[in-house]
Image (tube, rainbow, N blue to C red):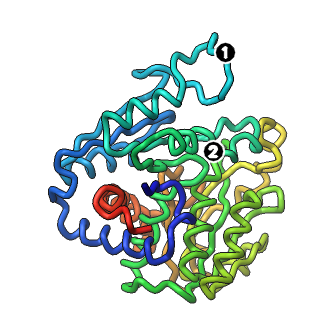
């Protein structure tokens, strides 16, 4: 049985298969590949694009999606073993995963970090518990990584550059200011997939406090070595943007400050100039700009950038529908692909 938890678990050939299948679904939206099938979508956190695209994707291929919000319209779930459940949780993940596996063909999970202790959050306990106890394939709808967004992003780049081969492109993953400390999931994922695809990747962030977790930095280094690309870390805005083919923006909180965000805030406030604006994009090689959305205009990127022909964020968001159909179809009908 194959899960879709992280793209790092899949071969490059497997990822390219998913992307090609997504292109087919984009050209022909309706089908019966999942007729009579079902998927449980568990949202521990809010969603707009993810919920809409998964529900519609399942429907367009003939499947039925059941949406559950544990703690709201479903019982709160306990994830720790050996716990005396005398608090707010009503049932254990072991029973939840096994019962849902008896009902549905796929389980998808969205569960953000708690933002208190990164050493705890980096274990991705909710997602991994579903994968451990479920007897059907599990899909990551965003936890500490966001692999569905990765594929939608890469598909948009392949469409933009009219090739599946992105090797040699200069790719800049830039930190941007946000008034609140946000999840590192999309940044972790962008770094992972860009280096898997052989691009020359620069991680641009204000200082070492904003470096991503060593797991994803390590993946980036090993991926670049395997793919023939490169990976560098920079704190120099002008040098990073110079000659870039792709600029991907994301805000995230500094990991050393997990659970102490008020102490991080004065540092974060110094770096509002990391906003993606026309002057920075003018330094690129006619580069494209994207973001996972939602995006706060004139905080992360200016109106002029968002409304320019260079911005492919909406195209990337649409691609979520198609890549997720490809994932569901492949896990059900072609489990040998990985």
Circle 1 residue = 84
Camera-side residue: 72 or 234? 72
Looking at the image, is 203 positioned above or below residue 331? below
Circle 2 residue = 124
Q: Is residue 328 visible?
A: yes
Q: Is 80 placed left or right of 11 in the picture?
A: right
Q: Residue at x 29, y 72 (%)?
A: 23
Q: Position of residue 20 (x, y in %)?
A: 33, 74
- Counting residues from the N terminus, which is met first, the one under dot 2 or under dot 1? 1
Q: Quadrant of the C terminus?
A: bottom left
Q: Across the whole image, how many numbered discs are drawn on residues? A: 2
Secondary structure under tag 2 reads loop
Camera-side residue: 73 or 33? 33
Q: Residue at x 47, y 42 (%)?
A: 109
Q: Residue at x 46, y 54 (%)?
A: 3
Looking at the image, is 255 positioned above or below residue 236? above
Secondary structure under tag 1 reads loop
Q: Position of residue 200 (x, y in %)?
A: 63, 83
Camera-side residue: 327 or 306? 327
Q: Residue at x 82, y 56 (%)?
A: 209
Q: Quadrant of the N terminus?
A: bottom left
């Amino acid at each position: 049985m194959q899960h879709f938890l992280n793209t790092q678990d899949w071969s490059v050939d497997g990822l390219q298969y998913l992307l090609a299948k997504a292109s087919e679904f984009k050209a022909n939206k309706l089908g019966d590949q999942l007729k009579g099938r079902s998927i449980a979508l568990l949202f521990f956190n809010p969603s707009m694009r993810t919920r809409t695209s998964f529900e519609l994707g399942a429907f367009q291929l003939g499947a039925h999606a059941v949406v559950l919000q544990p703690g709201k319209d479903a019982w709160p779930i306990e994830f720790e073993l050996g716990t005396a459940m005398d608090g707010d949780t009503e049932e254990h993940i072991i029973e939840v995963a096994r019962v849902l596996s008896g009902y549905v063909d796929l389980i998808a999970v969205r569960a953000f970090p708690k933002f208190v202790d990164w050493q705890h959050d980096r274990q991705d306990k909710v997602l991994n518990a579903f994968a451990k106890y479920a007897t059907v394939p599990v899909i990551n709808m965003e936890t500490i990584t966001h692999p569905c967004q990765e594929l939608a992003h890469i598909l948009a780049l392949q469409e933009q550059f009219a090739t599946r081969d992105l090797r040699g492109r200069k790719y800049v993953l830039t930190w941007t200011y946000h008034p609140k400390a946000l999840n590192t999931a999309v940044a972790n994922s962008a770094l992972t997939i860009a280096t898997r695809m052989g691009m020359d990747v620069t991680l641009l962030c204000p200082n070492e406090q904003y470096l991503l977790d060593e797991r994803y930095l390590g993946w980036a280094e090993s991926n670049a070595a395997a793919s023939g690309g490169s990976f560098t870390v920079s704190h120099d805005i002008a040098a990073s943007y110079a000659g870039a083919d792709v600029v991907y923006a994301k805000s995230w909180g500094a990991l050393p400050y997990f659970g102490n965000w008020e102490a991080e805030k004065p540092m974060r406030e110094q770096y509002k100039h990391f906003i993606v604006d026309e002057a920075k994009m003018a330094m690129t090689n006619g580069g494209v700009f994207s973001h996972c959305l939602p995006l706060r205009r004139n905080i992360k990127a200016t109106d002029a950038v968002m409304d320019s022909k260079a911005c492919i964020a909406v195209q990337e968001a649409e691609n979520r529908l198609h890549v997720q159909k490809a994932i569901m179809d492949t896990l059900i009908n072609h489990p040998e692909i990985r």
